[in-house]
Image: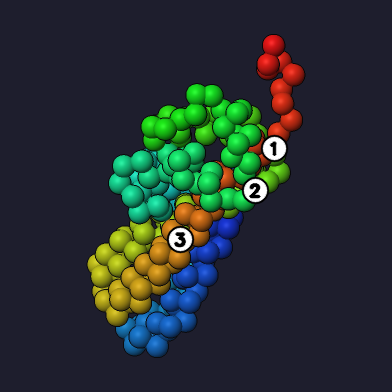
Amino acid sequence: MTAKKGNLSWLSAFIAFDVAILCAVLAPQLRLIATEPEVVARAASSLLAPPALLLLSSLIPGHVKASLVFWRGKFALPGHRAFSHHAHRDPRIDTAKLNARVSPYPIDELEQNSTWYRIYRAHRDDAAVLDANRRFLLFRDLAVVSILMAILLPVGLWAMGLGLAVTPTLVVFLAQYALSAVAASQAGVRLVTTVLAIESTAEPNPKQGG
């Protein structure tokens, strides 16, 4: 099972929690218009089941997801600044040894990201890397789904005549998006620096050095 598929249950749990909170807050208003909160909850839960969440997340290209999470346009991923910035801010990374192991040392943003990804591929099965990657993907996809819900659900509620639910729904999902984006950004940087820390402290390859 991939990290992304493994996170689907967590995404569903987050969204189900949001729906439950909204239904509890809006229960009096929903009953005034002869709509049972349980009916709304069941409908929302069906629409936001794991397959639907996977589809929603898959509709967004990777570079757009990165921009939504890291709040940057071009070169949004932390891998684009892996060696010029992040490597110098984590005490776990021996920059002298890293510089010796990575040659030529990348400066260009695209070169930094591609070099970092090559190193990541060598250490992707390390437990610390797996954990950091799982956390990053979870919060990234939660941020993406949350911003989509902040756009789609208010429109759907308005079309159903549930205008009273629009503002609370917007507030809940925008707040969740902001918090998830911050968490994803931190997890993404942690993933980048964890890979570099492992590389900088790895034993030299006996095939290297003649």
**Circles 2, 3 touching at the beta carbon (< 8 Å):** no
Label 3, label 1: how many angstroms apart (C-alpha)? Answer: 29 Å
**Circles 2, 1 touching at the beta carbon (< 8 Å):** yes
Q: Which mark is residue 22?
A: none
Q: Which residue is mark 3?
A: 182
Label 2, label 1: how many angstroms apart (C-alpha)? Answer: 9 Å
Amino acid type, mark 2: Arg
Amino acid type, mark 3: Val
Residue name at image x 61 percent, y 28 percent: 101
Q: How far across and down, in percent of the image, does residue 16 sit?
A: 51, 66
Q: Which residue is mark 1?
A: 201
Q: Which residue is mark 2?
A: 92
Which secondary structure, mark 2? loop
Alpha-carbon neighbours of circle 2 within 10 Å: few (<14), some, or many (≥20)? some
Q: Image quarter for residue 129?
A: top right
Alpha-carbon neighbours of circle 1 within 10 Å: few (<14), some, or many (≥20)? some
Work out whether mark 3 precedes mark 1 in sequence or the reverse, and give the earlier one. 3
Position of residue 6 relative to residue 124, above or below, is below
- Residue pushed farthest top? 210
Q: How far across and down, in percent of the image, does residue 85 sit?
A: 46, 45
Residue name at image x 46 percent, y 70 percent: 19
Work out whether mark 2 precedes mark 3 in sequence or the reverse, and give the earlier one. 2
Which secondary structure, mark 1? loop
Nearer to us in this view, 134 or 186: 186
Question: In the rendered image, which quarter contains the N terminus?
Answer: top right
Label 2, label 3: how many angstroms apart (C-alpha)? Answer: 22 Å
Which secondary structure, mark 3? helix
Q: How far across and down, in percent of the image, does residue 105 sit?
A: 49, 29
